């Protein structure tokens, strides 16, 4: 366990309190904060700080970094996948995608995941620990510095369940959108969840302006319970009610993710049931042909099935698109690179 203070997870006002409590002047906090925003990794790089403050920081705090353990670049579309390690050696994945409007990063929020969805590589690998806010920031900074680009969009869709790490994720959202920090606006951030219902209500109350994305993956409780253990805890109706509340409270349209698995959730009847459930909601459905994960036996739905789903949803005025698969040659679906790395004898 690290007994040092995680300085990069502090907001400016927390940092001000911290430095003054330890006998330093308040304005020093702003100086430290702007060095941290410039991604410095050593206190000695903070050139305008007096040496007694630097010595204090070195003995009482640490700066989170994400070290690049492995990097894969897709031959097809320049998608970049990273395996990052943190101060304690734990590893997570992140993926940078390039779109017409800029760069987007998919980051992890936990090392592993407790939720155990049967189609998911992360879910199969078990849970180790939650990430701190600074470790989420560090993934973005490491990728930006490596690629020498500015990342403008963030999706919390990597390893882990963001709402199972609620406080650190919310802190990260405040830090990443801060004017003095990376300054990535809340409207450019999407949080994906398997549906921890009470936390969705809590999130709505914060009025952050982020997009909420729900991993639905089934039109009814029976099918959902087969692939997502969380469905035993909260019914689809309870989940959709929390989504309606999210829209009502924040004015932000909710997105539903639906991984299409051949013979499991992709029949015309499944599409009709889904359309009925979502009817009247201001939402968008992202269809994702399921990525094959070793040991699951799941096969992705074919193009005909995908089109049929889109048509049935469209007939009921629900917009759906099939998500473009990026980085298909580099295990771009999160959890897969880490599994491969460790199965091949990575440290
Ligand atoms: N825990 C959160 C966020 C991380 S998972 C969540 O579940 O939403 C990010 C997305 O990838 C989720 O929509 C998840 O359902 C999806 N996913 C996981 N494994 C997949 C696979 N093998 N194929 C397609 N999508 C997958
Ligand atoms: Fe966890 Fe999301 Fe994977 Fe389910 S899909 S196991 S919630 S990371």
Image (cartoon, helix red, strand yellow):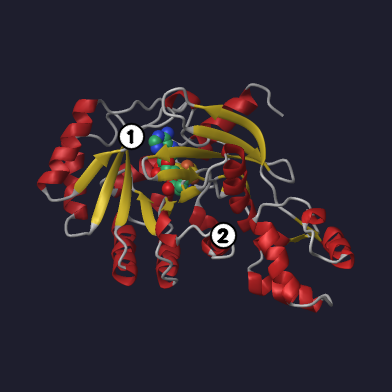
Instruction: Check contact, mark 2 vs mark 1: CB within 8 A.
Output: no
Q: Residue at x 17, y 55 (%)?
A: 279
Identify the mark at residue 324; answer none if there is no mark: 1
Q: Is residue 66 left or right of residue 334?
A: right
Q: Is residue 321 left or right of residue 15?
A: left
SS at mark 2 in the image:
helix
Question: How many marks on residues?
Answer: 2
Q: Residue at x 19, y 37 (%)?
A: 309
Give the answer, above or below, for where 124 lies relative to 177.
above
Occupied quadrant, residue 117: top left
Label 2 and label 1: CA atoms lie apart by: 28 Å
Task: Pick the quarter of the image with the C terminus.
Answer: top right
Q: Residue furthest front?
A: 48
Percent position of residue 175, x then y: 57, 62
Percent position of residue 180, x then y: 59, 65
State the residue in front, 63 or 264. 63
Q: Is residue 212 left or right of residue 160?
A: left
State the residue in front, 65 or 28. 28
Identify the mark at residue 49; answer none if there is no mark: none
Percent position of residue 142, x then y: 62, 44
Q: Which residue is mark 2?
A: 172
Is residue 118 at least partly visible in the picture?
A: no
SS at mark 1 in the image:
loop
State the residue in front, 144 or 254. 144
State the residue in front, 16 or 145. 145
Is residue 14 at least partly visible in the picture?
A: yes
Percent position of residue 179, x then y: 54, 65
Whereabouts is ligand 1, in terms of quadrant?
A: top left
Dot 2 alpha-carbon crowd within 10 angstroms: few under 14, some 14 to 19, many 20 or more? many
Q: Say if disc 2 is inside 8 Å of ligand 1.
A: no
Q: Earlier in the sequence, mark 2 or mark 1?
A: 2
Q: Residue at x 59, y 30 (%)?
A: 71
């Amino acid at each position: 366990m690290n007994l040092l203070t995680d300085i990069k997870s502090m907001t400016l006002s927390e940092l001000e309190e911290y430095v003054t409590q330890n006998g330093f002047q308040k304005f020093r906090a702003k100086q430290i904060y702007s060095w941290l925003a410039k991604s410095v990794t050593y206190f000695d790089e903070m050139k305008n700080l007096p040496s007694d403050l630097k010595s204090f920081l070195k003995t009482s705090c640490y700066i989170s970094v994400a070290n690049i353990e492995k990097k894969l670049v897709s031959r097809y579309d320049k998608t970049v996948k990273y395996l990052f390690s943190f101060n304690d050696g734990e590893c997570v994945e992140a993926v940078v995608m390039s779109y017409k409007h800029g760069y987007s990063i998919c980051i992890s929020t936990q090392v592993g995941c407790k939720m155990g969805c049967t189609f998911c590589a992360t879910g199969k690998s078990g849970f180790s620990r939650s990430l701190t806010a600074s470790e989420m920031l560090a993934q973005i900074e490491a990728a930006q510095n490596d690629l020498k680009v500015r990342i403008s969009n963030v999706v919390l869709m990597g390893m882990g369940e963001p709402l199972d790490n609620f406080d650190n994720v919310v802190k990260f959202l405040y830090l990443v959108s801060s004017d003095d920090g990376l300054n990535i606006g809340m409207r450019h951030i999407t949080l994906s969840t398997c549906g921890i219902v009470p936390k969705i209500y809590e999130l709505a109350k914060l009025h952050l302006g982020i997009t909420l994305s729900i991993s639905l993956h089934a039109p009814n409780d029976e099918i959902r319970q087969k692939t997502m253990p969380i469905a035993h805890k909260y019914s689809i109706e309870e989940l959709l009610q929390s989504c309606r509340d999210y829209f009502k409270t924040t004015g932000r349209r909710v997105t539903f993710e639906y991984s299409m698995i051949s013979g499991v959730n992709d029949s015309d009847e499944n599409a009709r049931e889904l359309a009925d459930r979502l009817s009247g909601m201001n939402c968008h459905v992202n269809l994702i042909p399921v990525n094959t994960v070793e040991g699951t036996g799941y096969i992705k739905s074919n193009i005909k099935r995908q089109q049929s789903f889109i048509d049935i949803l469209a007939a009921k005025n629900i917009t759906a698109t099939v998500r473009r698969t990026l980085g298909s040659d580099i295990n771009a679906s999160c959890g897969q690179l880490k599994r491969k790395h460790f199965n091949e004898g990575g440290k």
